[in-house]
């Protein structure tokens, strides 16, 4: 018996096809994983099922009936509940109030009765929460349980969990898995979005793998292995990269020692990362997003203070230095998010000058002529399609990235930190950015490339480090890296050969 | 579904520069209803509002007198807002400047004007800076919301003024809650005989010029705009965002302090509780109307000065309440803010 059947679902965002004729079945009482890299289309598909997006093509059946899901309201009415990574809870209200919120009859809410009903529901579903507790006093794991209870209280028979373990500590993951197993035995059907292989193999019955918006295949847990899933998920046969091995290696220019840092929520995101990048090499850091790359790039850019460890550029200790000092030390930085790097409302010329403002001051005032000349020179050199006075936000993504590139690279930095340098760019701009990074390497810079695009890491790097849950799993020469092995390490399924134990 | 869709797209430049004009037109259309309800002919009312004050030299100069504190508070607010620091406390910082001026005006008795008047200005500026300091530090060090702290400090200083005037500073001659008259040498000279236009107007114009120069011609100005428009990106590019915001907040307070000095030394000659009918708050309207640009702030301040003067003319001539001027100002702010948001969208046939 199929709880859900999705047939030929297609969703486009402009020129990007996020879901390309996807077929997906969910059986009654199974836990079914949607596995794939970031951007494979998992969340888009589930947002369509929950009525947050509307498919351009395709049909959805719930219990065999064709349905039209225009909004989450429709989805809830059909017994579909979704728990996203960002919880929709009111911190100052109690658990019971949060659960009944928007699902009460009539005008009056009787706190006692609501608490009673929520307590009953919690007991019935075996979810351990205190209905009287205020949500703001709860841990992340407990809040997630409240979200699940909220969905079940609304009579959900089908529960969508979007990367539910991403926010949890390991012990909470255990509890979540036990809860899910119990609910499954009670007849609940669960869709479990994840990119972590071992989790999927632990908790799920069947696994559907998505890649680039298409279904690669659906397999039973019993009939597959982590290695096969990794291959399906990453799934590339050849790369066509010609690599010149044995190029001369220079001295270590960037040294990262035992670096640890916290994420925005104050949880450890980087754990004792140690890396060395030599002059004239690109060290690629591969990993699924959210495994500490953001924090690593922020620490190296000077916008996040590490809790432990050291960062050295040449012999200069830049641990905890501010961005101005890091820039002055000869570090060219390309931020993960372009809007972290340029200010849309300022002109191209102003953005290009901002990092080196002291050089454009003459007698206490800005030398607008030199700022303009500087911009004109970089616009020509980096083929930016813009004039110096254009507001930067009117530029295309590719041209905006070239502005950042020009600012970061024009001073021939000793060290280049490039985070997701081609994310969201078209083919031409991507090629351009990559060629510039190779140019920096050939010039003798030490380049640290953080990318979620495994192709990119493989195409550019001389050595590859794999990061998983804030730790470096392994560092290996690019010539020895194979996709399956990298995929397994990125998914936490395999320890690196030389990793610390 | 309606055959139209709204999408994000910036309005062309010519439309942006028309925004103040459109805002004024829309405001007058909206407030016309109120004028009619007050029993007056809207067209006639607006003639008194906008044209009558300019028809004689005396009342035209009075417009500039009204504009003087508004130019300063407008510049004060614009300076802070440009750096993304939402200083709602220009009103209180104005009072700080006024307290300093009332005090200096007494103790500088006998000091020649060439020395005393610059000291009044420096003292008033410093007092504004001082009153702006606590919220600015709280913002930069502890990320305390400056909107709340600057706003609340406005009430605090009003109580301080009240305590001073009903206590140690009460005028011994009249017994009124007002400070003793300041020394003649500290009074701002008149610019034009037989008008109330005083030196403060020149100070205000110079301040507007300085606002323009700093924002568009100095490294500090670029850093301020960068911090205001994109704090994260500014920090990434090496701008010391905290110091920049602190500087903007303090200078903003100092400029508001100058407005207080002007009112004491140019108009009232002593400190009274009602020295500002909300110039600091009106400064927010002016800075917003002027798009945080010096020229815009200058024009907006004079325009509001015109409406303020006109409100009295219109109420005398047509018997409508003086508050109509306030209503027009408030409506103008709301309409302008609305237009600033709307200009980022366009309606397209789907």
Image (cartoon, coloured by chain):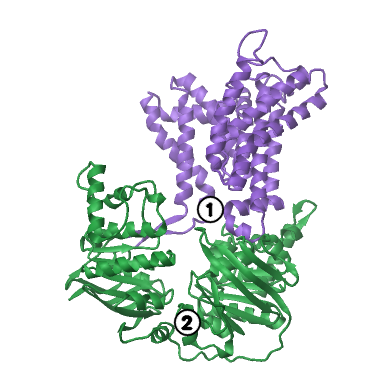
Chain colours: A green, B purple
- The front one of A76 and B200 is A76
Please identify the quarter of the rendering in which residue A29 is found.
bottom left
Residue A203 higher or lower than B20, as above or below: below
Residue A332: x percent and y percent? 67, 70
Residue at image location 46% in from the left, 77% down from the top: A492
Q: Is residue B1 visible?
A: no
Assess disc 1: are there few (<14), some (14-19) or many (≥20) residues with their C-alpha within 10 Å of its C-alpha: few
Which residue is denoted by mark 2 in the rendering?
A494
- Parent chain of label 1: B
- Parent chain of label 2: A
Please identify the quarter of the rendering in which residue B208 is found.
top right
- What mark, if any, has residue A396 been given in the picture? none
- Left/right placement of residue B182 relative to residue A450 reads right
- Left/right placement of residue A394 relative to residue A13 reads right
Please identify the quarter of the rendering in which residue A405 is found.
bottom right
Residue A134 higher or lower than A253, as above or below: above
- Find numbered disc 1 in the image and state the secondary structure of the residue it sits on: helix
Residue A159: x percent and y percent? 28, 66
- Find numbered disc 2 in the image and state the secondary structure of the residue it sits on: loop
- Left/right placement of residue B281 relative to residue A319 reads left
Which residue is denoted by mark 1 in the rendering?
B14
Residue A149: x percent and y percent? 28, 58
């Amino acid at each position: 018996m199929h709880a859900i059947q999705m047939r030929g679902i297609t969703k486009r965002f402009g020129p990007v096809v996020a879901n390309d004729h996807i077929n997906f079945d969910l059986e009654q009482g199974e836990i079914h994983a949607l596995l794939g890299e970031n951007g494979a289309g998992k969340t888009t598909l589930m947002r369509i099922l929950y009525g947050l997006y509307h498919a351009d093509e395709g049909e959805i059946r719930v219990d065999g009936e064709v349905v039209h899901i225009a909004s989450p309201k429709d989805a809830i009415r059909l017994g579909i509940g979704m728990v996203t990574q960002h919880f929709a809870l009111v911190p100052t209200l109690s658990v019971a109030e949060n659960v009944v919120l928007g699902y009460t009859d009539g005008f009056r809410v009787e706190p006692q009765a609501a608490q009673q009903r929520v307590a009953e529901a919690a007991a019935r579903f075996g979810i351990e929460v205190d209905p009287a507790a205020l949500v703001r006093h709860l841990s992340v794991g407990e809040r997630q349980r409240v979200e699940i209870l909220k969905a079940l209280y609304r009579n959900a028979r089908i529960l969508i969990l979007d990367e539910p373990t991403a926010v949890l500590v390991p012990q909470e993951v255990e509890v979540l898995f036990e809860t899910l197993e119990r609910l499954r035995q009670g007849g609940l059907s669960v869709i479990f979005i994840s990119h972590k292989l071992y989790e999927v193999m632990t908790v799920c019955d069947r696994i559907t793998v998505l890649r680039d918006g298409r279904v690669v295949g659906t397999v039973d847990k019993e009939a597959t292995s982590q290695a096969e899933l990794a291959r399906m998920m990453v799934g590339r046969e050849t790369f066509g990269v010609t690599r010149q091995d044995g190029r001369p290696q220079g001295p270590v220019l960037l040294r990262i020692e035992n670096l640890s840092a916290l994420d925005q929520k104050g949880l450890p995101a980087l754990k004792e990362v140690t890396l060395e990048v030599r002059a004239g090499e690109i060290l690629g850091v591969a990993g699924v997003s959210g495994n500490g790359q953001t924090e690593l790039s922020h620490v190296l850019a000077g916008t996040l203070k590490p809790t432990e460890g050291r960062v050295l550029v040449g012999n200069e200790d830049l641990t905890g230095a501010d961005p101005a000092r890091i820039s002055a030390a000869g570090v060219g930085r390309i931020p993960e998010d372009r809007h972290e790097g340029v200010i849309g409302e300022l002109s191209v010329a102003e953005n290009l000058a901002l990092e080196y403002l002291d050089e454009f001051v003459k007698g206490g005032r800005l030398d607008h002529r030199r700022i303009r000349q500087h911009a004109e020179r970089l616009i020509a050199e980096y083929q930016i399609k813009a004039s110096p006075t254009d507001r930067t936000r009117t530029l295309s993504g590719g041209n905006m990235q070239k502005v950042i590139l020009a600012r970061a690279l024009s001073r021939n930095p000793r060290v280049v930190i490039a985070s997701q340098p081609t994310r969201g760019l078209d083919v031409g701009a991507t090629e351009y950015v990559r060629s510039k990074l190779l140019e920096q390497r050939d010039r003798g810079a030490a380049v640290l490339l953080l990318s979620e695009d495994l192709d990119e890491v493989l195409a550019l790097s001389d050595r590859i480090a794999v990061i998983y849950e804030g730790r470096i799993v392994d560092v290996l020469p690019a010539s020895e890296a194979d996709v399956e092995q990298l995929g397994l390490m990125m998914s936490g399924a395999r320890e690196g050969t030389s990793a610390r134990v | 579904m309606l055959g139209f869709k709204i999408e994000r797209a910036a309005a062309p430049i010519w439309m942006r520069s028309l925004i103040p004009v459109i805002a004024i037109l829309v405001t007058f259309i909206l407030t016309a209803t109120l004028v009619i309800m007050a029993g007056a002919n809207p067209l006639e009312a607006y003639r008194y509002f906008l044209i009558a004050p300019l028809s004689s030299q005396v009342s035209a100069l009075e417009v500039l007198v009204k504009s003087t504190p508004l130019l300063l508070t407008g510049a004060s607010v614009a300076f802070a807002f440009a750096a993304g620091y939402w200083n709602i406390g220009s009103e209180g910082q104005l009072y700080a400047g006024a307290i300093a001026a009332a005090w200096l005006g007494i103790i500088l008795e006998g000091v020649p004007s060439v020395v005393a008047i610059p000291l009044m200005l420096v003292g008033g500026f410093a007092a504004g800076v001082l009153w702006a300091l606590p919220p600015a530090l709280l913002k930069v060090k502890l990320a305390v919301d400056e909107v709340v702290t600057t706003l609340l400090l406005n009430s605090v200083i009003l109580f301080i003024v009240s305590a001073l005037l009903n206590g140690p500073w009460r005028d011994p001659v009249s017994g009124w809650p007002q400070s003793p008259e300041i020394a003649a040498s500290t009074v701002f000279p008149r610019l034009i005989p037989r008008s109330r236009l005083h030196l403060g107007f020149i100070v205000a114009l110079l301040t507007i010029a300085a606002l323009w120069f700093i924002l568009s011609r100095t490294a500090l100005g670029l850093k301020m705009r960068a911090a205001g428009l994109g704090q994260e990106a500014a920090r990434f590019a090496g701008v010391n965002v905290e110091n920049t915001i602190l500087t903007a907040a303090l200078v903003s307070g100092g400029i508001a302090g100058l407005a207080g000095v002007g009112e004491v030394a140019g108009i009232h000659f002593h400190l009274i509780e009602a020295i500002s009918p909300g110039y600091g708050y009106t400064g927010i309207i002016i800075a917003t109307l002027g798009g945080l640009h010096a020229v815009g702030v200058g024009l907006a301040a004079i325009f509001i000065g015109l409406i303020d003067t006109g409100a009295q003319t219109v109420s005398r001539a047509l018997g409508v309440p003086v508050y109509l001027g306030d209503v027009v100002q408030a409506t103008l702010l709301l309409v302008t803010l609305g237009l600033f948001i709307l200009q980022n969208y366009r309606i397209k046939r789907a």
